[in-house]
Image: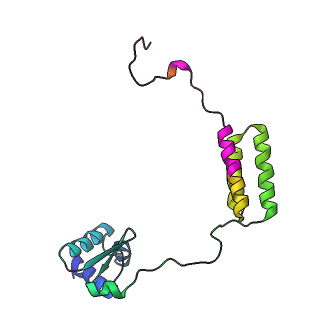
């Protein structure tokens, strides 16, 4: 069979897939060609396409769109934060960040504050860590350029040399 026939048959058997999923299922064809074939089939009315949340899903007919629902993201009641929440780890990171701040290494301290932020599970603690990180960024020294390297935009009257 031809590429178009294979893609159309695959869409009829497996409605509701994206072009990436179709291309992954047909490894004997180039991904770009499979995606172009699916688009061609839609353009000529042989399959239907339903767009939702930035993805286009292909169906054999319009009635398949109603029966097949796209996979939904799993809803979890667990915390969306991935840190361990161990107070000892957080305390060690906080003390390390404070030591770096005392030495004047504000960029490094900001990175350590971010690590502590990632470890924390408590919202209030995370907010405090985020504020400390922002304070480090505000304390960082900005690079100072010599005056002769700075050229301001606008009308310039004078010698560049």
Q: Position of residue 129 (x, y in %)?
A: 71, 53
Query: What is the quadrant of the N terminus in the image?
Result: bottom left
Please indicate whether residue 71 sits to the left or right of residue 37 in the image: right
**Observer-nearest residue: 48 or 35?**
48
140 horizontally vs 3: left or right: right
Examine the rendered structure and indicate whether residue 83 appears above or below residue 105.
below
Magenta stretch secondary structure, dominant: helix
In the rendered image, residue 46, in percent from the top left (x then y), is placed at 20, 80
Q: Residue at x 60, y 27 (%)?
A: 144
Placement of 45 over or under 90, stated as above or below: below
| Residue situated furthest front in the rendering | 124
Residue at image position (24%, 72%) is: 37
Q: Residue furthest left?
A: 44
Task: Tell me the quarter of the picture where residue 137 sits.
Answer: top right
Instruction: Residue 142: say if magenta.
Output: yes
Q: Determine whether 69 is above or below 91 in the image.
A: below
Question: Which of the 4 image quarters holds residue 64?
Answer: bottom left
Determine the image quadrant of residue 85.
Answer: bottom right
Report the span colored magenta.
131-148
Name the residue nearer the viewer: 36 or 141: 141
Q: Residue at left 26%, top 84%?
A: 62
Q: Can you give x and y, in whole percent of width and height, for residue 42 in the image?
A: 23, 75
> Which quadrant: the C terminus?
top left
* Left or right relative to 133: residue 87: right
Q: Please give the count of numbered marks on the rendered protein.
A: 0
């Amino acid at each position: 069979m031809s590429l178009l026939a294979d893609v159309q048959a695959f869409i009829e058997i497996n409605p509701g897939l994206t072009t990436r999923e179709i291309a992954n299922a047909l490894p004997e064809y180039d991904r770009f060609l499979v995606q172009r074939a699916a688009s061609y089939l839609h353009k000529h009315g042989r399959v239907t396409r339903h767009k939702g949340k930035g993805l286009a899903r292909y169906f054999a007919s319009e009635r398949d769109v109603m029966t097949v629902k796209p996979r939904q993201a799993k809803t979890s009641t667990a915390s969306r934060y991935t840190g361990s929440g161990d107070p000892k780890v957080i305390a060690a990171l906080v003390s390390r960040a404070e030591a770096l701040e005392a030495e004047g290494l504000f960029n490094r301290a900001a990175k350590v504050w971010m690590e502590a932020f990632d470890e924390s599970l408590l919202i209030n603690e995370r907010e405090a860590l985020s504020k400390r990180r922002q304070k480090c960024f505000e304390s960082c020294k900005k690079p100072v350029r010599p005056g002769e390297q700075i050229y301001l935009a606008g009308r310039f009257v004078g010698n560049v040399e």
